[in-house]
Amino acid sequence: MKKLSNKAKNEIIQIATAIVIALLITLVVLFLTSDEPIYAFNKLLTAPLTNMRYFGNVLELMVPLAFAGISASLLFRSGLFNMGGEGIFYISGIVATVLATKHLGNSMVHSTIVILGASIFGGLIACISGFFKAKYNANELVTSLMLNNILFGVGFYILKSKLKDMSVTGVASEQYLETAKLQVLIPKTNVTTGFILLIVVTIIIWLIYKKTKLGYTIKMTGINKEFAKYSGMSFFALTMIVHFMSGFIAGMGSSVHLMSMYDRFTWSALPGYGFDGCLVAMLGKNHPIGAFVAAFGLSYLRTGSDIMARNTDVPVEMIAIVEMTLVLLITADFVVKYLKRKKAIEGGSTNE
Amino acid sequence: MNSFIALFLTPAFGYAILRVTTPILFASLGNVISDKAGVSNIAMEGTMLTASLAGVLVSAYSGNAFIGLLAALLVGVLFSAFMAYISLYLGTKIIMAGIALNLFASSFTVYVLYMFTGQKGNSASLASKQLPTIDLPIIKNIPVLGEILSGHNVLVYVALLSIVVIYVMLNKTKLGAHIKAVGENPSAAASVGINVRRVQFISLCLSGLLAGFGGAFMSMGYLSMFTRDMIAGRGWIAIAASAMGRSMVIPTVITSFLFGIFSAVGNVLQLQNMPSELITTLPYVAVFIGIVGYSIRKYKKEN
Amino acid sequence: MNQEYILELKDIAKVYDNGVVANKKISVGFRKGEIHAIVGENGAGKSTLMKIIFGLEKPTSGQILYDGKEVTFASPLDSIAIGIGMVHQHFMLVPSFTVLQNIVLGDEPTRFSFIDSRKSKKKAEELAKQYNFQLSMDEKVENLSVGMKQKVEILKLLYKGAKVLILDEPTAVLTPQETEQLFVELKKFKESGHTIIFISHKLNEVKEISDRISVIRKGELISTHNTNEVSLESISELMIGRRIEYEYSHIKKEIKDKKITLKMENVTLESGKIRLLDDINLIAKSGEILGVVGVEGNGQSELVEVLFGYKKPTTGTIDVNGTSLLNKKIKDIRDQAKVAYIPEDRMRQGIADTASIAENMISSFYDAKEFNHKMFMNHKAINKLSESLIDSYSVVCQSKDTEIGSLSGGNIQKVVVARECYANPELLIAEQPTRGVDVGSASFIHERLIELRNNNKALVLLSADLGEALAVSDKIIVMYEGQIVGFFKELSGVTESELGLYMLGIKQQEKKEIERAMYEEA
């Protein structure tokens, strides 16, 4: 146990260091560019806690981020570099929109159909890259990036030609039926039952990692593919399953987000959640609970910076600097390496 | 039907192909260099974006397009050097660093743009300069060919020239030999005293330089200003092009031109009331099929 | 100043960051124009010492003198500049480059900053001619045979003006003819004033080629001798120290109801035009350990690859207890045919290094009933098994949750052996099961293998250590150029040198004779 807690300790030190450095850099940037740096800094960090609506914003924004993050982390953990979450978010959103604008039952049933439909569709779409990777070893990074743009093109075409509500200006689908939308949990926010679904998914994935053969296979394949093969694990089956799960969760994230926050489908560009998901997965060290926490943190920062932007002269995009610093410092292994080396040197000298 | 085909037989179409291919060509050649050295630079998109903004800002404030170009190149190199430092020396996986930097560039450029102009959408309020176009002597007088080849932005010719330069660099110079050796067998390179990390660092910087050219072309040639997320996937296409060209100069150039042709076709078809959303996916579909087809062939060969 | 030596090491010591001591105060001198062999067992510290001489590793303490002057190497660049070159065991060549490009790599002559190969080509060709190397400078290295690649490596060093050539196990990958040719060349270098440091553990070769021999054992330089003054036996004793005579006959039980477990018939494996396995017919019986020996690269690893489903044989059949292994997935070979496998390269195939010991302990049977409880894995059972195996195999570690990659090689290997033996296979393939493992762990592992044999299971043991093969096995086959050239059903009286003759292809038994003997036995 001692060794393991050591590892955890190192990670905590690293994450803490990363956060401190990121905050310091933020402060420096604010001093350089803002007339009221301390005020802005204060807004950024504390505003989301000042009223329930703001905090609700944090929670509602973290939902798609967390879904996308868990989706990406499944792939990364298996050693697959697929970034197709972006396109799946879009096309599953289209599927959800098709379902949500039709009468398909009462509240509970309709929203379930919408979410399941979008999720299953997302899972199947993800299996395209998955299949070519598993069977023919086609580079999943490239195929998934290409698919992002193809799916967007197809989805946008469907939106414009089949789903568009002619009575409104701009590109938007018809209105979602009330029965399709998710029930609000916290009044005056868009925090819906989708948040509960997120918690359930997080726990299920955590259980899969921790307790099941599938989770075990994912971990072993991710660490050493050659070893997994030697142990008799099927790379083909695993790749397909993981891709399906990943697409399923991305599709779910997309539909939950739409059914919580939107009245119509209005995305005329890729939404960005796929790439954000990669970021979240990295920050969360490819762990579902890590992704959950990272999504919360990212959402908190973005909400904070949004409030800051509305109250000060600092634009919201400033937050990119903080995000990048955090990601790079948390994914770099120099802190762990440094601690390990220090320990090894100390250990070595006592051995003499 | 005849009139439909005629749309593609105009000199303007040939001219458009060159123009559309140029940024992709720069970026994919950049990728060839880094791939050859065994490091994949997936931050092309972000590098080009940042460089294109730098070009616009500096040209506007200096009043000189070429100083703007220099700034774009410098920023391209610095951006890549930063990524190289983080991944080669601090141990972040280079793909992770690339993803993070792309996202960073997308917001950071808007932030900087806002700081300078108070606008978040584009740099229209700045009096930024455009790089000049060049009429090729003699060639410009040849019918058809002249219309296709002459009168382009100077960077179009730089792009064409860089095909040769990079081919020669990789195949005829010491640096090129070292880059290929490092990518193919790093321990062999190290055993004869080549500093592997340094060569990889240099390769990434060179790919950043090319991305700088691509970025500058976008904001000071293709368009005459910076707009938010103006690279619009060209960096990703470039990665796909060099993947399809298996990191070899000539096949990558051919793939880049195929892309250019598909994009140009798309642009023409859009004007013909064809569904533009579907048509813009053409180049992506082409690469998808190309990559998968190549993998299947390789798989069949091995089994 | 002692000008007797061109290169001299004084009190070189190397302690790695993780506390492993690779070299302890080694002092040795190399004369101009001599072939100086460095011998020692695997893991004795030869490679580290050579890396220090070549500038790939920095010594923790000690001096290196070249031509009487002290030198320090920041990188191989410095040692190359001085005139020291090394031919590594794994060739340091760029496959897609031509011979010439590989030779000039790192120091390409340029003209107006372009590579100018006219002069270098002439120089390289002259060198090749001088030493009678039949090499075309414009051939791509990937098209060359192993022996030719080695020549490229040597030519590369000569081209760079190396006076001292270090050759790390140069004959391990060569055919006997190639080896012979290499020795002729080495003697030529010696005559032209080069110093050759020849690292090997093949004593007969060392005896044949070298002028002096230095013996390294457990990181220490034991002694240096003139080759013509010492016998192979005494060198061998010095190498091993207290000679460990593995002796297991007392624990091998008499097995009554032996049966044929593995049957390979007419198995051939072709890669292009090369026959890696050439009509292999063999039988392995339960209650027996079948040793497989041969010089590396004579088909032993391919034998394992077709057995364990990594490669499909071009022709032939393989059965284990009547179940055909052809076209079976590894999963089915493990579960249905009940074959287990201790791989040669444990870090690459045998473990997931950042996972825990417990996770590595069950990888071969993670989906077995006893470790699963409905949907979930039964961590209680897994932990219990891990703890008991750690205990019974005396794996030195903090706990079952320790990252396996942080253990020593011997302890990692114990985990692999524990796992594969626990699978209770009908057939266990053990490939170099004790390579790089300390002596204590090695005999422990041997005992476990014999235990499995005593439980009437079949084992195939591939070993480069003939002492091990002779002590552990019940029968031995010798492989040479993809064929079985010798079969020994009775090992008492068989010596290492006898096996050596077969391994080198000097002696061969009749193919029919071998098959008859094998089947007759059955």
Image: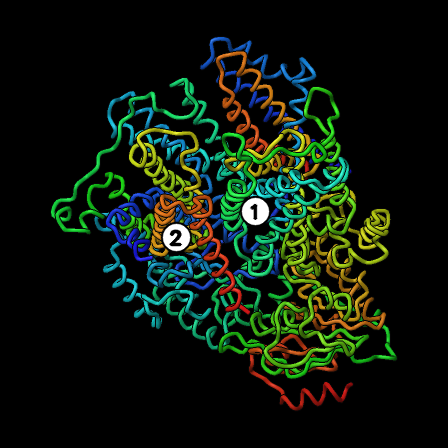
Rendered location of residue B44, percent (x, y): 42, 40
Residue C338 relative to residue B87: left or right: right
Helix, strand or loop at label 2? It is helix
Is the C-beta separation of discs 2 and 1 under 8 Å?
A: no
Residue C230 relative to residue C104: left or right: right
Q: CA distance from mark 2 to mark 1?
A: 24 Å
Residue type at the position of mark 1:
Phe
Q: Nearer the viewer, residue C491 or B271?
A: B271
Colour mapping: rainbow
Rendered location of residue A324, percent (x, y): 53, 29
Residue at (63%, 36%) from the top-left corner?
A340
Residue at (29%, 45%) from the top-left corner?
B16
Rendered location of residue C343, percent (x, y): 67, 62
Above or below, A223 relative to C176? above
Helix, strand or loop at label 1? It is loop
Q: Mark 1 highlights which residue?
A: A81
| Residue at the extreme right | C256
Above or below, C38 relative to A32? below
Residue at (75%, 71%) from the top-left corner?
C459
Q: Mark 2 highlights which residue?
A: B180
Q: Nearer the viewer, residue A272 or C386?
A: A272
